[in-house]
Image: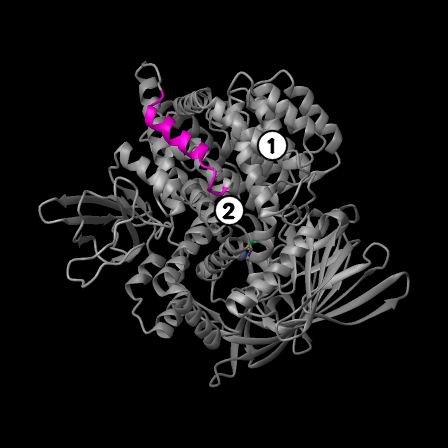
Amino acid sequence: MKDGRSGKSIFRKDYTAYPWDVNHLDLNFDIGRETTIVRSEMAFHLKDQTRSTHDIVLNGSNLQLVSLSLNDCLLSEDEYVIDGETLTIPGAPRKSVLKTEVKIHPQSNSALEGLYVSGAFLLTQCEAQGFRKITWFPDRPDVMTSYRVTMEADQSEFPVMLSNGNQVAQGDLTGGRHWVRWEDPFPKPSYLFAVVAGDLALVEDKFTTQSGRDVALRIYVEAENIDRCEHAMESLVNAMRWDEQRFNLEYDLDIYHIVATNDFNMGAMENKSLNIFNSKYVLARPDTATDADYQGIEGVIGHEYFHNWTGNRVTCRDWFELTLKEGLTVFRDEEFSSDMQSRAVKRIRVVRDLRSRQFPEDDGPMAHPIRPDQYVEINNFYTATVYQKGATIIRMYHTLLGEAGFQKGMKLYFERHDGQAVTCDDFRAAMADANGVDLERFGRWYSQSGTPQVHITDHHDPATGKYTLKLRQHTPATHDQKNKQALVIPFALGLLTANGEELPMQLEGETKASGGTRLLLMEDTNEEFTFINIPEPPVPSLFRDYSAPVKVFYDYTPEQLAVLITFDSDAFVRWDAAQSMAQGAILEQCRRRAKGLEMRLDSSLIKAFEGILSDRMADPALLAEAMILPDEDYLAEQMEVVDVDGIHAARKFIKRALAEKLQALLNERYAELNDGLPYQKTPTAMARRVFKNVCLSYLTETQKGESITAAQLESSDNMTDTLAAMKGLILMDSPQAEAVLADFESRWSEDSLVMDKWFIMQAINPGADTVNKVRELMQHPAFSIQNPNKVRSLIGVFSMLNPTGFHASDGSGYEFHADRVIELDALNPQIAARMASAFNRWKRYDEDRKALIKTQLQRIAAVDGLSGDVSEIINNALR
Ligand code: PHE
Ligand code: ZN
């Protein structure tokens, strides 16, 4: 196995505490691109008072060991044992000072974990287990240590040298060299360690905390990006203020640094006071970044900032507990975005994302509970399940306890655990104890994988005016768990009349009725709720605001859906009803097509969309969400055997037919929204733009579409409108498309982030030929297989967002993709594993495609020296 990792599963139940306290770590970096020398000094104290000696076990990977000494005695090779990634010093005395010197090689580090090079600077990435690529250390989150870091390097090549905490000293050295020392007063786990060294420009601002302390805010970027940091800075200030106001949490140091890099495996990293960001989540200017990019930046800047309390001050006992910090911090960033923008729109986007990314995970070969019980490679568990489903579990506490109760729980959590490495059970106990409630059964959400289904039937008795809802929950078996238990499911309900009025609700046995939304609770497999004084059969508005992460089954008639779409007070339910109606229509046409019947457009869908389009009261961003048809992958999830081409054709048919029927209205709304005002960043302007561009995407399906689209491109002063128009021209196969792409290319060829968009637009283009285009684009000077953003934009988008390309019936997409997985595995196993997961749903396709994919999976599995990352994904897929 590469990097000396074992390739074997490790289990949550096997946790044992580290026997030593490591209170202090002194690190010295002699920085060079080719070779960096790392010297460390660590103080070990045995926790167990009754013993005089114990083994010291350290982790290390790819380190060139120069020397190792214990209490100032150099150890010879027979005085310690290196086995894979561990180094053991047997029988060390209860007070031990260890000194090590190692050499590492940043320039040749293509895995982007540990210390590596990005453009004009060097940087580190340590979560989850990257610190062991920097030096020998107990690289586990429950070992919390104070760090002092000294760096020295050539002054002109590395003018800026940063680490966590405060800069405490600096000086010049001979030969044009200099040194800097940093100290972090907060003990932290090694995964939060960071250094950055190189030639970086800086943007500065200041934040005064609620208690009156000034915090220096600095964003470091490569010099040419200095004019693109404003939005990130504004987002940071907003996040800091919001966390004080909503959670009463204040920042705890005098400096907050953000560094943007083009070379990053993930979105961003919450290193204590030295966040490192994928430049995608920092850099923005109206002409280079879309509204979605702006919103992404706000969300991720918030996310990393919020980790300072939920993750850094209170961290995870081990990596099985990852959702303790991630689920909670995603919940916090969702709330931040909801408070900054539109709560309803944010909720809808979150649910769309959960359904299209997390549900397939729950139903696939890598299904795992939000707190997994075992893993081979922890990097494979930074998943939508741990993050997004994890956040829905936190949201359910909030739904059950209310804002005040939830905040009481948070307060107790920090009182009990500040400075500790803890578990999800500790969090749940804080919530329970602070509110005096029993959350024992709720804990099952942490240990059960799979998406629960809730099947609902109802009955109205006109004679008695009683209305009964029967709910049955059922979680299908997953590959990792056969038997499932009943879960605690918050069930938010409304009842509407056929005219869309809300009915007051009074359960049998209650003394009075209450209006609005009722929060009910499912605690068992079967639950029944009977309401009295219900004069007519109501339309149930189910799981309002998506009160639990479940699949809901209820047989709505088209009339009932229409009532919800038009009248429901809950924006999520309105949207969901429109989605169900559209989904039903598309899947029906897909079936008709398979039978050789002509496809057709149902009048109820036309009426519903006409209603949405003519709504001039609602937030345009909500209308946009309602108009966006379910995507092809999500539709594929609804079929027993995926009909790749059928789904594409049926979706296209419905979209075009709607566009033709509603052309006049679409034109009218488009014209209203296309107001010619100069670009603005406000939520209102963004909402208008998104609705306008959804209207445009329908109009591109019609005769006049091309001229409208070309006109928008011509007059656009921002990237959102430009990209929407370009996508339109490409999708309609306009003769202008090629020239437009070439224009864009020559304008932005030097701009890495904008070129990502150029790759995406081409990789996503439907059809079996796209694989050739993608292959060709890999030769483009702006593409690099070593750069994760490029890989995601071209290869990831093709394999995961272009079903008719990837699943081309001749298998060319599969073969191409398997080649890339193999190529990437030798460079960057984490990214290779992400790409490999594009094959995860293979068993849901027809026999021919299954056979083609299986061949590719076996070909990957047979590669000599395959990483643990990729083999875990592939072996699970094949099993
Ligand atoms: N902890 C980071 C976040 O969620 C994600 C991350 C994981 C980044 C691993 C890098 C490596 O904010
Ligand atoms: Zn996070």
**Left or right relative to 324: residue 185:** right
At 57% from the left and 34% from the top, the residue drawn is 673
Q: Residue at x 36, y 21 (%)?
A: 601
Res 362 quadrant in image:
top left
Q: Nearer the viewer, mark 2 or mark 1?
A: 1
The residue located at (64%, 46%) in the rendering is 681
Q: Secondary structure at mark 2?
A: helix
Q: Is residue 22 above or below residue 66?
A: below
Q: Nearer the viewer, residue 642 or 219?
A: 219
In the picture of the structure, the residue carrying the numbered disc 2 is 869
User: Residue 634 placed where, x, y %?
Assistant: 40, 35
Residue 612 highlighted magenta (yes or no): yes
On the image, numbered disc 1 is attached to which residue?
674
Asked if one can make out residue 294 in the rendered structure from this viewpoint, the answer is: yes
Can you give x and y, in whole percent of width and height, for residue 751 in the image? 73, 38
Q: By what rule are the colours in the image chosen?
A: one colour
Q: Quadrant of residue 652?
A: top left
Boundaries of the magenta span = 601-619
Residue 216 vs 608, above or below: the answer is below
